Image (cartoon, helix red, strand yellow):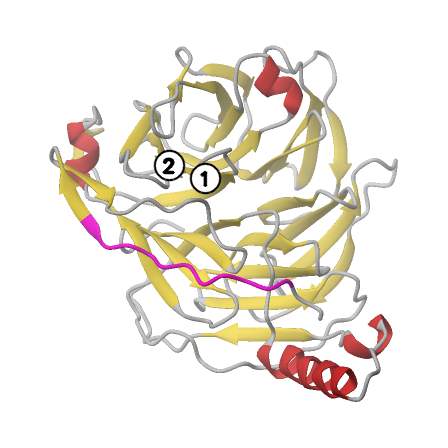
Amino acid sequence: MIYVTMLLLTLTLLTRVNGQQTVADIIEGFATNVMLMTDAVGPAIRGFNVRTYASSTPFSYTLENVIELGVSRMFEGCNRTLRPHGIVLYEGEYADSIYWADAGAGAILGLRFDSSGLHILAHGLNRPEHVAIDTSEESRLAGGALLYWGDSGANKIQRCRIVGQSGAGTCESTPTDVLVNVPLLGGLAWHSGRLYWADGLTSRVLSAALNPLTGLVFSPSVVEVASAVAIPMAIAFAAGSGDLYVLDQERPTSLGRVLADSNETGVERLLHYGLSRPRAVVFAEGQGRMLLVDSGTRSILALEMGEAEPTTHTLPHIREDADFEPRGATARSDLAIYLQALDFVAEEQTSSADASGRRLGTSQALVTTTALVAWSARRCVARAHI
């Protein structure tokens, strides 16, 4: 079999508890076939089942919800408009938690998938968009996971240590500046004790070593990791290989890869494609597959990570709803992507072999390809905020 057996995830309806929206029933972690995305139209957290291609909404929230939790109604003389962006998932011992930046709320939000409800870890920010998390043993032993976010309005990266046993937790103290004077932030990632960020002004990806006890940068330690990334939109690490993947919106939009531990800063362009506004990269490393999420076309591109020149294969439409605009995406580390047109064939071959007393070898069962998953949607009015 080329994918792990997956349990179906039942996404619950929302109820009101003490004036807040909460998940009605306890979900003990996420199944390995669900990718979560922030939706700027909702605003909401959408679930996309990578086996059935069905979409659901496990959580949505309103401006009134975040105002009740301390966010101001006005910002710079105008009413706030919620705009969720980057999102990360923390695989907890008893239940998973998600954390995301809402640029419109000027806040970092958290939700554990039990009945604890929405939490605000930090507010009063300018325009937070990108998030990253350090859940390493070193940070947890030092007091808790470290959450980082990039504030595009203030041109800086901040962090807080997540503490507390209630729900998604709280910040241990007031958010601390990690780096300042970081203009046009185009992505944020944590990997092996280092923080990585895309600098849209200089068209580079930079990195700095972090102190695991404090989550602050060892100085001086900033190095260039990737160069000539014209319009960086997202960066992400394949944890197993140490490869850093970069989404560049310069036409034609491309997916690039660089080995972060090497001295080479040139980006290997793996794929040029027609997605108009790439937003996120999500990995299924156990299968050697990955997903690219695009906001402009509301589409998901799935491909084999080892391919040098991927091809495309179109799967059935998965969403007819135009009221959806993905901004960020995340999933569990054991995500398993099902490519129906290919994995079904491999399953049939495996079943036939088992029935005749033979077992297919890996090279026979695996089919290397790329799949384009697209949902049809009406043209939406161009938005002022990218």
What predominant SS class does the magenta segment belong to?
Answer: loop
Disc 2 crowd rating (10 Å Cα; few below 14, some 14-19, many 20+) is many
Question: x%, y% of residue 176?
Answer: 47, 14
Looking at the image, residue 315 lies above or below residue 30: below
Looking at the image, residue 264 lies above or below residue 307: above
Name which residue lies at 61% across and 51% down: 334
Question: x%, y% of residue 199?
Answer: 61, 36
Drawn side of residue 43 relative to residue 78, left or right: right
Numbered label tally: 2
Residue 119 covered by magenta stretch: no
Name which residue lies at 22% across and 28% down: 76
Name which residue lies at 37% across and 47% down: 27
Name which residue lies at 71% across and 69% down: 2
Three-letter amino acid code of the residue under disc 2: Arg
Question: x%, y% of residue 344?
Answer: 63, 82
Disc sitting over residue 13 in the figure: none
C-alpha span from label 1 to label 2: 6 Å
- Disc 2 is placed on an element classified as strand
Q: Earlier in the sequence, mark 1 or mark 2?
A: 1
Drawn side of residue 78 relative to residue 43, left or right: left
Highlighted magenta segment, given as a residue range: 4-14
Instruction: Read off the residue under disc 1.
Output: 96
Three-letter amino acid code of the residue under disc 1: Asp
- Quick check: marks 1 and 2 in contact, CB under 8 Å? yes
- The reply to whether residue 73 is visible in this rendering is no
**Quarter-of-image position of residue 207:** top right
Looking at the image, residue 301 lies above or below residue 137: below
Instruction: Read off the residue under disc 2.
Output: 112
**Quarter-of-image position of residue 152:** top left
